Amino acid sequence: MNRAFLSLVKSLLVASVAVSGLALAAQEHQPAAAPAKADAAKGSTLYAEGDAKRGLPACVSCHGAAGNSTITVNPKLGGQIEGYVHKQLVDFTTPERANPVMSTFAKMLSEQEKKDVAAYLGSQAAKPGAAKSKETVELGKKIYRGGVAERGVAACAGCHGATGAGIPIQYPRLAGQHQDYTIAQLGQFKSGARKNSPQMTTLAKRLSDEEMQAVADYIAGLK
């Protein structure tokens, strides 16, 4: 081989490496694809019909039309904060919130489907509930609004709002929620069965059963 040929080969190799480097750099600097937006219409269909092919039942069978459950051990979800619903569906797929029923179904949903169902529920109107016990409603009101200072129990209103409207993603809407469901969740936080909120675990452990029932009853009457 003569020098001219070797020089040509060397030049072509250098050019090839340079082009490859430019192509790789261009790929690295391409903007990531934006995540698909939640589709409440698709969420509505999945909520109402489920997916028989996957053995996924309709959410409406347990949580009621528009998320307004009439079964007191199943939560009302209509009007719940969209980001919070999505977070709980994700949590159900982890040991942080293990539930024999919901963990099974949540694992069957894609990330997009979780977002779609959450968007649908967040767009629905919540039906009000009502307190049942006049004897304990004042105790529930006192704890909800002012906490229990001597035991380090913070006021529920500090995170969930004076009217129980909640704070997006972190703290759920509580207003009108079934007493039975709220009591059950406080009990799970207290026992450690539900692990996806360190704050609630700490607070629930400092409440007596009577106080939890009083707070749950007061919450049910919030509007």
Image (cartoon, rainbow, N blue to C red):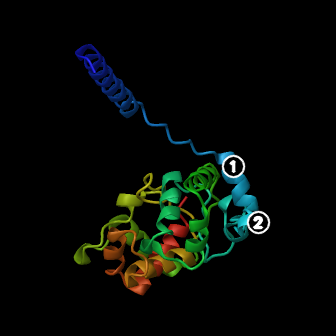
- Badge 2, how many Cα within 10 Å: few under 14, some, many 20+? few
- Please report the residue visible at 46 percent of the width from the left and 73 percent of the height from the top: 97
> Disc 2 designates what residue?
52
Q: Nearer the viewer, residue 24 or 189?
A: 24
- Please report the residue visible at 43 percent of the width from the left and 57 percent of the height from the top: 162
Residue 105, image x, y percentages:
61, 69
Residue 107, image x, y percentages:
56, 67
Helix, strand or loop for disc 2: helix
> Disc 1 designates what residue?
42
> Would residue 217 appear left or right of 198 to someone viewing this image?
right
Q: Nearer the viewer, residue 7 or 92?
A: 7
> Would residue 157 appear left or right of 2 to someone viewing this image?
right
Picture quarter with the N terminus = top left
Residue 92, image x, y percentages:
50, 69
The amino acid beneath tag 1 is: Lys
Furthest toward the top, the residue is: 4
Q: Nearer the viewer, residue 98 or 63?
A: 98
The amino acid beneath tag 2 is: Ala
- Please report the residue visible at 40 percent of the width from the left and 69 percent of the height from the top: 196
For residue 217, above or below residue 45:
below
Helix, strand or loop for disc 1: helix
Please report whichever mark, 2 or 1, sits nearer to the chain's N-terminal start. Answer: 1
* Count of numbered circles in the view: 2
Asked if the residues shown at circle 2 and circle 1 are in contact, with their CB atoms under 8 angstroms apart, the answer is no
Q: Nearer the viewer, mark 2 or mark 1?
A: 2
The quadrant where residue 117 appears: bottom right
The quadrant where residue 17 appears: top left
